[in-house]
Image (cartoon, rainbow, N blue to C red):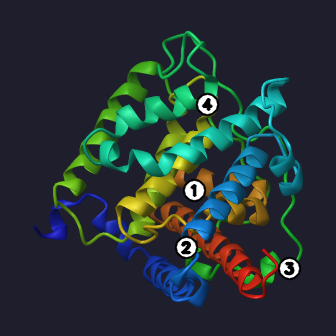
């Protein structure tokens, strides 16, 4: 079927987006061609999941070192610890939900929330209702990693506007959330049925990521869920079928100010804002590729 039936198709032609898509594709292909991937792909996948979970937890307010995440086994003592545990549980199961995602994305989102909060929580897996609060998406400020600005600098077409970091608007009400989730689900199921298959994976993943951050459908852990859903899309769309590209690591390295600024562009809904958001997601993904490439190099040298 023609990509003209896909409402996301025009986004792939926004200024700077074709270049972002091409750069991501080139980086991912290079990683998949690494000689370590021929015999130790499963190990790279596991390491990517761990590093992605650590990074996603950091963005959600629990900035632990990778060594601490490896060392710990109890993740229920306090809110910060529970966030790390939630990220790890989501990462462990997200890749197994692909078949369900293709026909029922909302069921997967509910499952991800249940994994995060635990099945003993009365609201596990249930979107928030009218009058219920929602956690802050960015409870912790993370500075950009040293040297990242030069390695992943945006071009003019996909750069977010300069100036103070804008405050994010309040989360939409429950009725709007339900309607927009249904619309998003219908779009994704239609893609799984073969409609709009020409739209690049980066674009689809970025929109799922941005829309879930915009809606904040659950009372808690919305950032973890949005980033996990974006990773599932990259698997489902065939860009990263082995899930070895931890974009969450790149989001941390780019810093929360850049994340918030790019998200504000998505929320604005302008062509420039959407292009900036997709470009930001592309840069994060390329940095995730760089992380896994370093893992492969360490494995090749016998250090892992």
| Residue, disc 1 | 265
Circle number at residue 63: none
User: Which of the pair 263/220 is nearer the observer?
Assistant: 220
Say whether residue 288 is visible. Answer: yes
For label 4, the SS is: helix
Residue named by callout 3: 147
Q: Residues within 10 Å of mark 3 (few under 14, many from 20)?
A: few
Cα separation between marks 3 and 4? 33 Å
Give the alpha-carbon distance from disc 3 to disc 1, as whole Å. Answer: 24 Å
Instruction: Tell me which corner region of the image, top left, top right, bottom left or bottom right, holds residue 146.
Output: bottom right
Q: Vertical placement of 128 versus 200: above or below? A: above
Q: Which residue is found at the position 45% from the left and 29% from the top?
A: 110
Q: Quadrant of the C terminus?
A: bottom right
Q: Residue pushed farthest left?
A: 1
Disc 2 packing (10 Å; few <14; some 14–19; many ≥20): some
Q: Quadrant of the N terminus?
A: bottom left
| Residue pointed to by mark 2 | 41
Q: Who comes first in sequence, dot 1 or dot 4?
A: 4
- On screen, residue 57 above or below 67: above
In 3D space, how far apart are the residues under numbered discs 2 and 4 (Cα atoms)? Answer: 27 Å
Spatial distance from mark 3 to mark 2, Cα to Cα? 28 Å
* Secondary structure under the numbered disc 2 in the rendered image: helix
Q: Residues within 10 Å of mark 4 (few under 14, many from 20)?
A: many
Measured from the top left, where is residue 53 in percent x and y? 68, 50
Give whichever of discs 1 and 2 has the lower sequence position: 2
């Amino acid at each position: 079927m023609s990509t003209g039936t896909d409402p996301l198709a025009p986004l792939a032609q926004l200024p700077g987006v074709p270049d972002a898509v091409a750069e991501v594709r080139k980086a991912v292909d290079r990683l998949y061609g690494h000689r370590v991937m021929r015999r130790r792909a499963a190990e790279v996948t596991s390491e990517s999941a761990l590093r992605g979970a650590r990074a996603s937890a950091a963005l959600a307010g629990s900035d632990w070192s990778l060594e601490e995440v490896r060392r710990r086994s109890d993740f229920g003592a306090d809110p910060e610890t529970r966030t790390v545990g939630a990220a790890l549980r989501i990462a462990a199961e997200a890749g197994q939900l692909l078949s369900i995602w293709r026909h029922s994305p909302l069921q997967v989102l509910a499952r991800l929330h249940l994994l995060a909060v635990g099945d003993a929580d009365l609201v596990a897996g249930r979107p928030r209702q009218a009058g219920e609060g929602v956690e802050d998406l960015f409870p912790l400020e993370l500075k950009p990693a040293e040297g990242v600005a030069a390695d992943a600098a945006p071009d003019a077409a996909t750069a977010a506007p300069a100036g103070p970091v804008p405050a994010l608007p309040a989360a939409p009400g429950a009725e709007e959330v339900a309607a927009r989730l249904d619309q998003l689900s219908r779009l994704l199921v239609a893609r799984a049925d073969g409609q709009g298959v020409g739209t690049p994976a980066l674009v689809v993943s970025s929109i799922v990521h941005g829309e879930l951050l915009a809606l904040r459908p659950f009372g808690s852990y919305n950032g973890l869920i949005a980033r996990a859903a974006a990773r599932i899309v990259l698997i489902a769309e065939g860009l990263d079928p082995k899930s070895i590209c931890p974009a969450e690591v790149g989001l941390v390295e780019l810093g929360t100010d850049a994340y918030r600024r790019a998200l504000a562009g998505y929320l604005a809904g302008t062509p420039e804002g959407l292009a900036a958001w997709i470009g930001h997601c592309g840069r994060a993904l390329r940095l995730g590729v760089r992380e896994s490439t370093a893992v492969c190099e360490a494995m090749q040298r016998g250090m892992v």
